[in-house]
Image (spheres, helix red, strand yellow):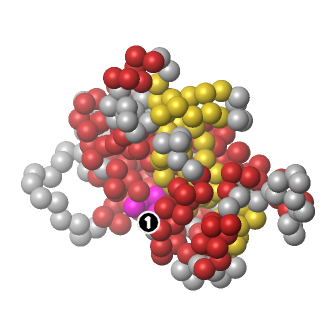
């Protein structure tokens, strides 16, 4: 099978349409179906066009004949924000369709999602009161926004995720995420989570142990290393590679969201694009699971 953007979008549209088959909508049917909307959003993320207005102008030339009807920028924005629950469900459906879903190793980490830079913008933003200032040690800088907390497999397949204010403790957010999606830990004997020093906590260790999972993370320098800790560093770098894909190729930091729903929808859009690429690469037997090169032009 030829692996290109059109093939991916066709397969994705069919899969979403099959998933939504039999779903009854109230009111007049939209001219752009939900399947078309999500496919259009994935294409936008893969082709790296952060501006929705510019994207809608480019679609006829970039994907001729693929979408018979295109809404205006305002309508597209509203539809995408309204479709946030569907975006989350489709991410899970595609992830569960792959053989990577049953991976017994998960990577856990968080990364900044900047939402503003100037102080006046931060004060009058609709995110004021939710977003906040945080420090990013990886880049040695402060930022104003949210943090994306991601659980994924070593191949980069998203398992679950959440956005939280920077002031929230990573360990508490992880427990809240797993509590909100309790079925994730069912039937996963011997599950191992790999994390960094931000997740050192006896409470978290006990929480995971009660659910049949274990956490492996570096110890503080003055403590004796835990078994297997010397093997952790190379594997831990994989999640940094996943974040590099989200930020470098899918323009996560150029999301343009100005409200919590807007930011969340745009983050979900990029996670769906990443999941769709991994799903299609696994189905077509590509050697590099997370490669987006075939789809970014």
Segment tinted magenta in the rendering: 89-93
In the rendered structure, the answer to whether residue 186 lies left or right of residue 22 reads right
| Residue 85: quadrant of the picture | bottom left
Magenta run includes residue 158: no
Which element is circle 1 on? helix
Which residue ends up furthest to the left in the rendered image? 27
The relative height of residue 20 versus residue 67 in the rendered view (above or below) is: below
Magenta run includes residue 92: yes
The answer, for residue 89, to whether it is visible in the render is yes
The relative height of residue 226 versus residue 79 in the rendered view (above or below) is: below
Residue at (73% x, 53% y) in the render: 196
Crowdedness of circle 1 by 10 Å Cα count: few (<14), some, many (20+)?
few
- Residue 251 picture location, percent across and down: 55, 33
The answer, for residue 61, to whether it is visible in the render is no
In the rendered structure, the answer to whether residue 33 lies left or right of residue 253 reads left
- Residue 283 picture location, percent across and down: 59, 63
The answer to which of 88 and 9 lies nearer the viewer is 88
| Helix, strand or loop for the magenta stretch, by majority | helix
In the rendered structure, the answer to whether residue 20 lies left or right of residue 3 reads left
The relative height of residue 159 versus residue 143 in the rendered view (above or below) is: below
| Residue 125: quadrant of the picture | top left
- Residue 64 picture location, percent across and down: 39, 35
| Residue 65: quadrant of the picture | top left
Which residue ends up furthest to the front in the rendered image? 222
- Residue 185 picture location, percent across and down: 55, 75
The answer to which of 210 and 18 lies nearer the viewer is 210
Which residue is the site of mark 1?
A: 180
The answer to which of 9 and 126 lies nearer the viewer is 126
Residue at (66% x, 39% y) in the render: 244
In the rendered structure, the answer to whether residue 212 lies left or right of residue 167 reads right
């Amino acid at each position: 099978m030829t692996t290109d953007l059109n093939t991916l979008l066709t397969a994705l549209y069919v899969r979403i349409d099959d998933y939504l088959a039999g779903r009854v909508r109230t009111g007049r049917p939209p001219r752009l179906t939900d399947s078309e909307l999500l496919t259009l959003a994935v294409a936008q993320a893969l082709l790296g066009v952060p501006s929705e207005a510019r994207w809608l102008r480019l679609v006829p030339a970039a994907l001729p004949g693929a979408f018979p009807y295109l809404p205006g920028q305002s309508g597209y924005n509203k539809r995408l924000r309204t479709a946030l629950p569907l975006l989350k469900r489709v991410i899970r459906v595609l992830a569960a369709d792959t053989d990577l879903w049953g991976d017994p190793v998960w990577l856990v980490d968080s990364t900044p999602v900047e939402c503003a830079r100037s102080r006046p913008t931060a004060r009058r933003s609709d995110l004021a009161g939710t977003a906040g200032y945080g420090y990013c040690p990886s880049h040695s800088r402060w930022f104003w926004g949210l943090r994306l907390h991601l659980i994924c497999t070593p191949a980069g397949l998203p398992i679950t995720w959440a956005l939280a204010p920077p002031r929230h403790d990573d360990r508490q957010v992880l427990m809240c995420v797993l509590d909100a999606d309790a079925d994730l830990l069912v039937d996963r004997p011997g599950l191992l989570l790999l994390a960094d020093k931000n997740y050192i906590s006896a409470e978290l260790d006990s929480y995971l142990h009660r659910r049949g999972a274990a956490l492996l993370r570096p110890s503080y320098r003055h403590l004796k290393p835990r078994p297997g800790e010397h093997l952790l560093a190379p594997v831990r770098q994989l999640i940094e590679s996943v974040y590099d894909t989200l930020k470098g190729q899918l323009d996560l930091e150029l999301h343009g969201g100005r409200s919590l729903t807007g930011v969340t929808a745009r983050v979900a859009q990029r996670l769906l694009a990443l999941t769709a690429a991994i799903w299609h690469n696994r189905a077509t037997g590509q050697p590099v699971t997370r490669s987006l090169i075939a789809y970014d032009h």
